Image (tube, helix red, strand yellow):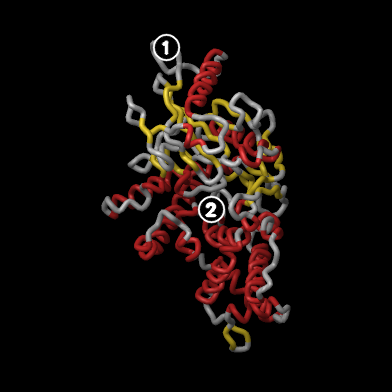
Amino acid sequence: MATSRQEGGMDHADADSGVPTYDDDDYLLLPFGADSLRSWATSIRNTLISNGDIATYNANPVPVVCTGVLASMPGSYNIVFPLQFNDGVRWALKVPQAAGLTGFSNPAARSMATEVLTLYILRQQTTIPVPRVHHFYASMNGSLKYPYILTDFIEGIPLDELWFNSKIPDDELLSFRTRVLQDLAKAMVQLDRFRSRRGGAPKFNSQDQLYSVGALRTVDIAASEDTPVWCNVGPFTHATSYILALFDRQESPTQPFEAGIRKLLMLFVLWLSELDDYDSQDFVLTHPDLDLQNILVTKEGNITGIIDWEGVAVVPACLGNLCYPPFLTYDWCSAVRDSNPGESQENAAKGSQELQHLRAVYLDIIEGLYRSMGTQCPATTRRSIVIKNLKLAADDPFFTRPVVERVFRTMKQDVGKPLAVDGWELNLREVARNLAEDAIDTRTINVLKDGFLHVFNSL
């Protein structure tokens, strides 16, 4: 995560530049402070210059020195320290937050190496704006005594600061958003070239080709409380096993209604196999969290960087690069919308109609890109609003009930006829109770299945 956002912590300032900087008190349990970090960064950069790995950026070369460590930028699992050099260059040092407490496991090291190699290959084979990696060390035993990735600092404004900009007219905001979506779609379509018949953590060969996958390191959300609990899942040969990977690790609720909701979610996921091309779909390289905070833009809406590729994975195409980005689907489930910190209640009230329009804009852009390539656009984007929410519900028990309720409500609205058996309209509480007690009949199951599949016909 290398952004220009200055946030969090204490507010110190460099006397010469006025730029916020941090002192040793802000480094928590990290084995370095601001002074040692400046010295280390100076040494690393000069070593890379002397080795011919990078060049200076100065017409009149002077000794390159790291002159400042700017305000740190904490994320969910990492902290980024912007490093300012005396020749105008700015780098970003990304370190894992918890390694000082939990250590740095072999799976964590493999995940970091995968992220670095993915960034390198994306820069070589696509025009996706990702940071250039200068150096990394996936161990606690290096010169910094801490694992790290050193990249260029990408200039840009995090999209979450501008997406809900109420200070400009609506037509200007729509133009801004449309430019963002155009750039984003062009970037995501390029990931199509990285496909596999299996899913998991990507592995590249010496020709920088995606040739295999390994186990995927991810957070077990249900098991995580104050600190994240990491686990390894996969590799996968089918989309269903990928969607249910974390779901299968969870204990079933003892409360009958919640247990029935969980069983209905399982049925929804299994019924996805009835969709055209679902069982034969490939897996595709995909950004792990393509949300607002990980997209950097200009004030005009041009994307300057797509960041935070930690956990990059080869996932089922139905959950992959052609899906709607999360910020276009917040309205679909109230629990997801309410968990979005960037959107006020006022924005949420009017947001559904806007988001429906923006989804149509994004879909039109995606379809246009495929037409320009002479290729038929898959149904992935249209379907993703439902399938991504099912994956969210399977991963995180907090979202299981609200997502199932939303799907069931959509089934009743879109099926074109009453969701009923023998004239009795089905209600979710009764369906869930009967599922929990294994007392549901085949006819009811078939009505539910038909209603669920009809949702995709109406998208």
Q: Going from the N terminus, do you reach mark 2 or mark 1 first? A: 1
Residue 292 is situated, as x and y percent measured from the top left of the image, at 45, 48
> Do the CB atoms of the residues marked 2 and 1 lie less than 8 Å apart?
no
Label 2 – label 1 distance at C-alpha: 48 Å
Residue 128 in view here:
no
Observer-nearest of 363 and 45: 45
Q: Is residue 321 above or below residue 399?
A: above
What is the number of callouts on the image? 2
Q: Quadrant of residue 357?
A: bottom left
Residue 360 in view here:
yes
- Determine whether the residue tagged by mark 2 lies in a helix, strand or loop: loop
Observer-nearest of 301 and 75: 75
Mark 2 sits on what residue? 323
Residue 459 is situated, as x and y percent measured from the top left of the image, at 51, 64
Q: Residue at x 47, y 37 (%)?
A: 26
Mark 1 sits on what residue? 62
What's the residue type where badge 1 is placed?
Answer: Val
Residue 168 is situated, as x and y percent measured from the top left of the image, at 27, 50
Q: Quadrant of residue 439?
A: bottom right
